[in-house]
Image: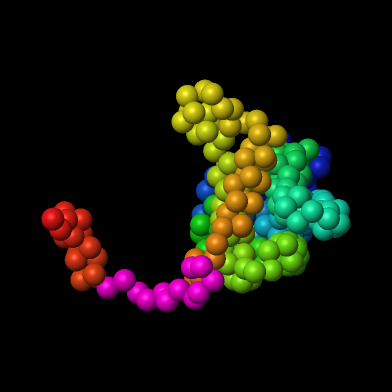
Amino acid sequence: MTRNPNMREAILSAAELLFSTRGFNAVSIRDIALEAGANPGSITYHFKSKDGLLLEIYKRHCGPMNKRRIELLVAARRVRDVQDRLEAIVRAYVQPAFSSSSDLAGGGARFTRLRAVMSAEGNAVVGRIIAEIFDDTTNAFIDAIAESLPHLPRTTIVWRSQFLLGALYYTLVNPERVTRLSRGEADGADMAEAIEQIVSATVASLQASDINHVDGALRRTKPIQPHAVGIARKRKENPPD
């Protein structure tokens, strides 16, 4: 086991790698120490606990990303044309996810994979960290979008912002799927193209009509009863003459 002179960074890099591939719950402090070439005591000395280590990983990636997002958001809100402003707001959120932290070990894609794995685990510790790191910035973007689309309920914007987050995760983690499904006509690793495609799709999603309103009238949303599904299926199979 070779000692790394920059032990703190080695521990962070090792933990990020293991968390992104195995998840948070399955990785022990001993596993991280072995990967980093450290002793377990070094981890508790620098980060107190595994929770503290995960929080520091989020901070070192998301600090620069959130800072850049807010800088771009401030500029976007000054755009006069409403359509251009909405596009600028969405781009201000998307672009830093591709560019931030690329100078760190593993780059932005590995951290995005870690975030996806952490979210899937549903760990309470992870939930608290995500809230601490992201909620203020995300609320600032939701408020800015709401100002550009005042006819939409805030809850609808929250839903559609959640879909944007899913698109970001998958695009960064699995770009080769775009290349494969397009039969090579698109390059999933083309970050500039990915940004524009996500921005375009998100703006269109945000501008779609609210599902609870049709032609300005409130739509009644009732649970679909199982017998109604069966009736609809029979009608489809046996249409009237």
Q: Nearer the viewer, residue 130 or 72?
A: 72
Name the residue: 67% across, 57% down.
54
Q: Can residue 20 be seen in this view?
A: no
Asked if the stretch drawn in magenta spans residue 35, the answer is: no
Q: Nearer the viewer, residue 216 or 123?
A: 216
x%, y% of residue 37?
68, 41
Which corner quadrant of the image does residue 130 belong to?
Answer: bottom right
Name the residue: 54% across, 38% down.
174
x%, y% of residue 79?
83, 53
Q: Which region is colored magenta? A: 214-225
Quarter that holds the C terminus: bottom left
Residue 118 sits above or below residue 176 on the image: below
Which corner quadrant of the image does residue 152 belong to?
Answer: bottom right
Name the residue: 73% across, 44% down.
95
x%, y% of residue 238?
13, 56
x%, y% of residue 68?
82, 51
Whether residue 239 sits left or right of residue 38 in the image: it is left
Quarter that holds the N terminus: top right
